[in-house]
Amino acid sequence: QVQLVESGGGLVQAGGSLRLSCAASGRTFSNYVMGWFRQAPGKEREFVAATTWSGGTYYADSVKGRFTISDNAKNTVYLQMNSLQPEDTAVYYCAADRLGLGAAVPTRGPDYGYWGQGTQVTVSS
């Protein structure tokens, strides 16, 4: 089993920044993809960003140029969020799974087998 624990959420004014962290523990694996999803009240969960064991990074169009995903190669992934807007308000979830060589990066929630408990991000106008 893999355990994921997010931290770093909070309340910020529009235009501000936050950095989320996700620490993985347990039976982690080397060929991984780790992603961030978010779910706003009354909306479906949506893909935000992902990073892979080979160094690739992928973003939803809505966050490109504002959010940056990275990892420290020690089972922790970060999501730096700049220029936050009220529409970024949501519960942010970290997710992880194995990623085979040459496989496409998954952007759908069901493609990830491991999830954190979520952290609330609230952006005030």
Image (cartoon, grey):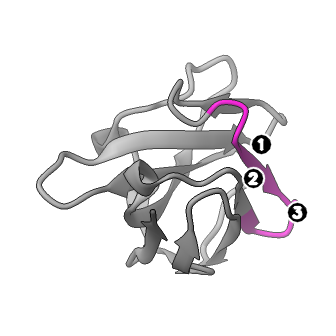
In this view of the protein, which residue sits in the foreground, 99 or 66?
Answer: 66
Q: Which of marks 1 and 3 is nearer the N terminus?
A: 1
Residue type beneath disc 1: Trp
Q: Residue at x 88, y 63 (%)?
A: 72
Q: Mark 1 points at which residue?
A: 53
Query: Which secondary structure, mark 3?
Result: loop
Q: Which amino acid does label 3 sit on?
A: Asn
Frontmost of labels 2 and 1 is: 1
Residue 65 magenta-highlighted: yes
- Which callout, 3 or 2, points at the residue further toward the start of the chain? 2
Query: Image quarter for residue 12?
Result: bottom right
Kindly report the distance in space between the C-alpha atoms of the residues bearing marks 1 and 3.
11 Å
The magenta segment is: 64-77
Marks 2 and 1, how far apart at CA: 7 Å
Q: In this view, does 118 lie to the left or right of 55?
A: left
Query: Which residue is more in the foreground, 87 or 70?
Result: 87
| Residue 107 in the image: above or below residue 21 | above
